[in-house]
Image (cartoon, rainbow, N blue to C red):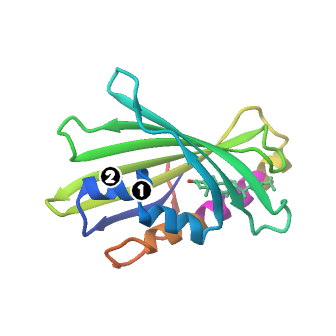
């Protein structure tokens, strides 16, 4: 996978969670700026085993000439809360884009980790991975990856820059073993 954000922000871990994983003004504005629309989301629901899940559906505007102008997407998020309560959050999100070429071959997994580093500071890390439901032909795989990474990089760079504290942006992505 790739690490797209890894930085300390001047807000509490709880606040960071609220900003990114509830329908906060920040998040709704952010999606608006990405021309993501028709957002619908279920509330967080506990599965009884310490995990919570929710599902988002939305339509994404794509600025890639190879692809149609829009795609619908379904994002399933699973939340694992740190046992210290409010100190750390880890969210794993599976994103399926339904109307792009080869959509039946691949999906994306984004892992968000929010860890408290001080009373009003937290570290946000975002790692992403492109995964396959069926193995594509080599050339197709290259094509899927090239286009996915560039779209993901663009998205998370902006997310890293847009946070309310106004300090810094996303770090340069790099490959992780
Ligand atoms: C979520 C991954 C791939 C997709 C896109 C597909 C190109 C098709 C490849 C063909 C357009 C918000 C992306 C980037 C759209 C945006 C998705 C976002 C950023 C030509 C082979 C949407 C996180 C997320 C996950 C996956 C991203 C798509 O919160 O390139």
Name the residue located 32 percent from the left edge and 58 percent from the top edge. Answer: 16
Badge 1 vs badge 2, beta-carbon distance below 8 Å: yes
Within 8 Å: ligand 1 and the Cβ of disc 2? no
Q: Nearer the viewer, residue 22 or 105?
A: 22
Q: Which residues are magenta?
A: 144-153
Numbered-mark total: 2
Q: Earlier in the sequence, mark 1 or mark 2?
A: 1
On the rendered structure, is 139 left or right of 79?
right
The residue carrying mark 1 is 20
The local crowd at label 1, few if under 14, some if 14 to 19, many if 20 or more residues have their Cα within 10 Å, is some
Mark 1 residue CB less than 8 A from any atom of ligand 1: no
Question: 3 or 103, which lies in front?
Answer: 103
In the image, 150 versus 164, the foreground residue is 164
User: Residue 1 location, x and y as percent?
Assistant: 55, 49
Pair 1/2: label in front: 1
Above or below residue 16? Residue 177 is above
Which residue is at 77% across, 38% downward? 105
Q: Which mark is residue 114?
A: 2
Q: Residue furthest top?
A: 48
Q: Is residue 146 magenta?
A: yes
Residue 45 position, x and y percent, is 41, 31
Quadrant observed for ligand 1 in the rendered image: bottom right
Q: Does 155 appear above or below 167?
A: above
- At 50% across and 68% down in the image, what residue appears? 29
Image position of 128 (left or right of 145): left
The answer to whether one can see residue 170 in this image is no
Image quadrant assignment for residue 96: top right
Q: CA distance from mark 1 to mark 2?
A: 10 Å
The image quadrant of residue 106 is top right
């Amino acid at each position: 996978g790739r690490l797209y954000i890894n930085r300390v922000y001047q807000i509490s871990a709880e606040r960071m969670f609220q900003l990114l994983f509830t329908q906060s003004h920040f998040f709704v504005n952010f999606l608006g700026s990405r021309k993501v629309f028709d957002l619908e989301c279920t509330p967080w629901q506990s599965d009884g085993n310490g995990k919570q899940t929710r599902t988002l559906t939305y339509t994404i505007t794509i600025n890639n000439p190879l692809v149609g102008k829009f795609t619908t997407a379904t994002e399933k998020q699973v939340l694992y809360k740190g046992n210290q309560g409010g100190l750390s959050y880890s969210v794993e999100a599976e994103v399926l884009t339904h109307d792009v070429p080869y959509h039946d071959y691949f999906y994306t997994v984004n892992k968000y980790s929010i860890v408290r580093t001080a009373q009003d500071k937290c570290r946000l890390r975002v790692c992403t991975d492109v995964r396959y439901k069926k193995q594509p032909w080599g050339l197709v795989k290259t094509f899927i990856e090239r286009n996915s990474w560039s779209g993901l990089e663009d998205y998370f760079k902006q997310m890293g820059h847009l946070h309310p504290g106004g300090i810094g942006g996303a770090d340069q992505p790099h490959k992780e073993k």
